[in-house]
Structures are given as C-alpha cells and as structure tokens.
Image: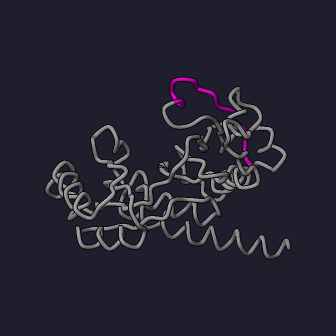
Amino acid sequence: MARVAARARNSAAKRAGKIIAAARASGQKSLSEFDSKRILKAYGIPVTREYFAVNLAQARTAAKRLGFPVVLKACAADQAHKTEHGLVAVNITTGKELTETYRRLERRAGRNFVGGGGGFVVQEMVPGEREIMIGMVRDAQFGPSVMFGLGGIFTEILRDVVFRVAPVRKRDALAMVRGIQGHRILDGIRGMKPVDLEVLTKSIMALGRIGLDFDEIAEIDVNPLIVKGTKPVAVDALVVLGD
C-alpha cells in the first residue's frame, strides 16, 4: 500500500510540475483557474467537470457534453477577480443563452483576450447550499500552512478559519474541520446529509502535500468548495507562484 501511495504522489507531482514549469516559462505570476484545478485534480481534490474553450463552437460543444445548466467564465492567468469584472455567468440553461452570454463576456474581456492566451471555461452548475474553503499560504518562517474555513460570501465577513503547518495528517485535518466556530454546517442539518469528512480531510491533506512538493507555490486559494449532496467540490481555485 505504501508503494502504491508513493507512486500516486509521484505521478501527481509530475503532472503538476509540468503545469507549473510551463507557467513559469511564460512569465506567469499565477495560474489560470483551469490550470489551478488541474493541479488540484492531480492530487485527488474533487473539482468541477469543465472544459476550456477558445471560441463559441468549442463552448457549445462543451455545454452539450456537460448538459445544461452550465457556468461560463473568462479564464486567463491574469484574471483573478472574474466576478468583480462581470466575467462570470451562472445558470445558463439554453444554447441561445450560452451564445448571447459568450459574446457579452467576450466583449467585456477585450478584443485581444483570446488571442493573448485567454479563453473561457464552460463548467457544470454545482447545486448546494453549503460553501466552505481550503487554502495554503507559504509562511517565511514555518513554510506551507494549510487553511480551512467557511467559504463564499462568509469568508471575509466572518473570518472563521483555522490553520495548520504542513504536513497535515488525518488527525490534524479532522481537528481543523471541527476547529471553526461554524463547524455544525458540516453536520446533517435542515434535511441535508453530513459532509463526507473522508473526502474533505483528504483534500485538506492534499493541499499540504502540494505546498511541500513545490516551493515555488506561494499561495493556493480554493473558494468555494460547494457541498454537492455530501461531497465538497472545488468550484473556483487560484494558484499563486512565488519569485
């Protein structure tokens, strides 16, 4: 089992390393949402089903594969604040609406957006009433520190978060999820089933592993993870590279 786990970690690091190397070679200071999620997925963190599109035809094909409703987002390495710039559209339910939305976002993004390396992510619409977040920040003294807390709009309002220095073991991750004041959001409440703590703790542990594997990653922000049924799914993500 130990050898299998080691091979899986090595494979994940190899795939992530290629993405990071390509970004650094092009002078990027951060990864696009799409590439950020590719790294998370390599390490076993659940992410949304999605496709990258550089034209309307590809966006239409992606929507058909995913099935409506879908989300459409502008996606580029320098597009960290998509919502604030009106570059995210949710709950698109028809092909006609997708076409109109694509053209509107394309105009907002700018004439040279796609030609300059940008594109659009067509993403499944993830239903769920509970939003949490995980992250990693590299401290100059302690190294990579992993964070867990309430996500979505509550992140900046409540600031209900806890930190642990990597590596994060399972007992540490379990202590983290019970360490926030709003931990009852993870329980079975209002007819909702309890959050799958196995998936959640593995995701927290994986972020610590990424931080240890790659000194060049300065920060990871995964916000929100929407709880779909019982499973937390990363809906948005940002990987920031250091000097």
Q: Where residue 65 sits: x, y (%)?
A: 40, 73
Q: Is residue 120 magenta?
A: no
Q: Is residue 164 magenta?
A: yes
Q: Nearer the viewer, residue 125 or 55?
A: 125
Q: Nearer the viewer, residue 18 or 150?
A: 150
Q: Is residue 67 visible?
A: yes
The structure residue drawn at horizontal position 26% and vertical position 60%, both measured from the top left corner, is: 98
Q: Is residue 185 above or below residue 109?
A: above
Q: Where residue 8 sits: x, y (%)?
A: 71, 72
Q: Where residue 109 sits: x, y (%)?
A: 21, 51
Q: Is residue 64 above or below residue 86?
A: below
Outermost residue to the front: 191
Quadrant of the frame with the N terminus: bottom right
Q: Nearer the viewer, residue 7 or 61?
A: 61
User: Magenta span covers which residues?
Assistant: 154-167
The answer to which quarter of the image holds residue 202 is: bottom right
The structure residue drawn at horizontal position 71% and vertical position 30%, both measured from the top left corner, is: 180
The image shows a total of numbered marks equal to 0
Q: Where residue 59 sits: x, y (%)?
A: 30, 67
Say left or right for 118 vs 71: left
The structure residue drawn at horizontal position 69% and vertical position 49%, both measured from the top left corner, is: 204
